[in-house]
Image (spheres, grey):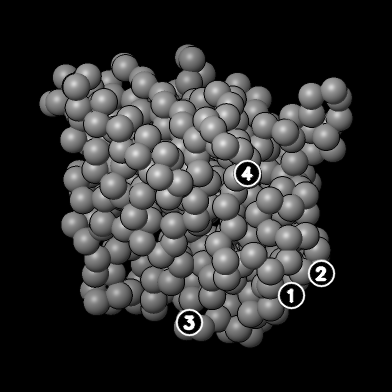
């Protein structure tokens, strides 16, 4: 049975200490589970201007694109309930989407980044600068022309996840945020997890919003603070592609459910078959996708699959077939079934495109696991 080597675990803590003490990374929160053992470690500053280790044990992190597979899990819950099929065309649920060469895009295409849509809208910055609502983003995505026909290329796309959130709303009559709370967060006891900060987080003598860790904004993005990651606009926006706020403890409950075949505290949240399908490579099922287009890539339904080509974010030592997702705010979640292990690494240092701190921490964690 896999277990954590105590001496090697200290190397993980030392590396995190080094990153934070040298101010390369303002804050790091870890939750690592191997078999039935879980270890957590917190280090760094709650706010960038803090002089010492002030990170709260219940700090809330903006996890960016780890949001994507969680939104996809909401759509998969609808699939289990008989509301849709992976091969359904998106225009069946959003008729206005079926224009400009998007007629053939299916829900599976959106979940596997094979729709041909771009990552972001061309005027993404302008919309954020104007504090545009999510509905305006969805409207403009529906008018987009894809870069390629569906099923031809693997191209990471946040726009597709925005459309999946709208599919949830059209089918259920609830916002994506409300639906995820109902079918995932509440059953899992994720009481500190929201897709968009609600008004009541600003109320009281000790408002919950004060627990949100401040991100260090990269110089190239530090232009208009009223729409950056730390702004009240972005925190409340609830971007389906990157707006989830949560804690390591809450996110750990979702990971526990995944590792236990969809079961959490005796309740079947998702079926074991659905978990298996969501966390295995789907690219071979995409008709028209060439071998060259698939090479070095792996996508399940929302989850990125670790292949021999991975090193960015996921490091170099995870087993092939592991799955997870990274986030542009400096976050990473992975599950390695072969090692019976998982890790949640939340930082406040954006690390695109290479994720060097995340990858190095992952390598050190995996090295601390004895099989």
Please name whichever residue, 364 or 109, is drawn nearer the observer in this view of the structure.
364
User: Which SS class for mark 2?
Assistant: loop
Q: Nearer the viewer, mark 1 or mark 3?
A: 1
User: Label 1: which residue?
Assistant: 126
Q: Say which residue label 4 marks.
A: 49
Mark 2 Cα-neighbour bin, 10 Å: few <14, some 14–19, many ≥20: few
Left or right? Give the position of 161 relative to 233.
Answer: left
Look at 86% across and 24% down and name the residue there. 204
Pointer 1 with pointer 3, Cβ within 8 A: no
Instruction: Give the residue at x 60% y 21%.
Output: 189
State whether residue 206 is above or below residue 62: above
Q: Earlier in the sequence, mark 3 or mark 4?
A: 4
Residue 84, x across and y down, in percent: 58, 51
The answer to which of marks 1 and 3 sits earlier in the sequence is 1
Q: Check contact, mark 1 vs mark 2: CB within 8 A.
A: yes
Mark 2 or mark 3: which is in front? 2
Compute the Cα span from label 4 to label 2.
28 Å
Q: Residues within 10 Å of mark 3 (few under 14, many from 20)?
A: some
The reply to whether residue 127 is visible in this rendering is yes
State the residue position of label 3: 149
Element carrying mark 4: loop
Q: Nearer the viewer, mark 4 or mark 2?
A: 4
Residue drawn at (47%, 83%) of the image: 148
Sequence-wise, the earlier of marks 4 and 2 is 4
Does the residue at mark 3 contact the one at mark 4 (Cβ under 8 Å)? no
The residue closer to the viewer here, 251 or 141, is 251
Residue, far front = 51
Q: For mark 2, what is the residue?
A: 130
Judged by depth in the image, the label closer to the viewer, 3 or 4, is 4
């Amino acid at each position: 049975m896999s277990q954590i080597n105590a001496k090697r675990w200290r190397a993980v803590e030392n590396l995190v200490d080094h990153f934070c003490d040298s101010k390369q990374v303002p804050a790091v929160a870890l939750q690592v589970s191997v078999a039935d053992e879980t270890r957590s470690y917190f280090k760094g500053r709650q706010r960038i201007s803090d002089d010492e280790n002030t990170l709260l044990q219940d700090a809330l992190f903006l996890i960016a694109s780890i949001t994507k597979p969680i939104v996809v899990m909401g759509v998969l819950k609808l699939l289990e309930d008989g509301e849709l099929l992976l091969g359904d065309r998106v225009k069946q649920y959003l008729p206005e989407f079926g224009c400009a060469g998007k007629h053939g895009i299916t829900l599976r295409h959106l979940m596997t980044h094979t729709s041909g849509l771009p990552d972001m809208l061309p005027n993404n910055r302008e919309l954020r600068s104007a504090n545009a609502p999510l509905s305006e983003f969805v409207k403009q995505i529906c008018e987009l022309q894809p870069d390629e026909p569906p099923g031809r290329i693997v191209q990471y796309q946040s726009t597709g996840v925005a459309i999946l959130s709208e599919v949830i709303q059209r089918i259920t009559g609830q916002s994506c945020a409300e639906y995820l709370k109902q079918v995932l967060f509440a059953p899992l006891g994720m009481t500190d997890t929201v897709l968009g900060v609600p008004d009541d987080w600003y109320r009281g003598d000790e408002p919950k919003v004060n627990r949100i860790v401040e991100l260090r904004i990269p110089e190239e993005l530090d232009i208009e603070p009223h729409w950056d990651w730390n702004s009240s606009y972005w925190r409340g926006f609830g971007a389906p592609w990157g707006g989830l706020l949560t804690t390591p403890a809450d996110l750990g409950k979702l990971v526990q459910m995944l590792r236990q075949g969809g079961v959490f505290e005796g309740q079947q949240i998702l079926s074991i078959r659905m978990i298996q399908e969501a966390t295995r490579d789907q690219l071979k099922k995409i008709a028209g996708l060439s071998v060259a287009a698939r090479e070095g890539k792996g996508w399940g339904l929302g989850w990125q699959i670790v292949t021999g080509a991975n090193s960015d974010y996921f490091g170099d030592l995870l087993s092939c077939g592991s799955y997870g997702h990274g986030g542009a705010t400096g976050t990473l979640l992975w599950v390695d079934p072969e090692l019976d292990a998982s890790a949640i690494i939340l930082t406040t240092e954006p690390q695109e495109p290479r994720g060097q701190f995340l990858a190095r921490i992952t390598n050190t964690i995996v090295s601390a696991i004895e099989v």
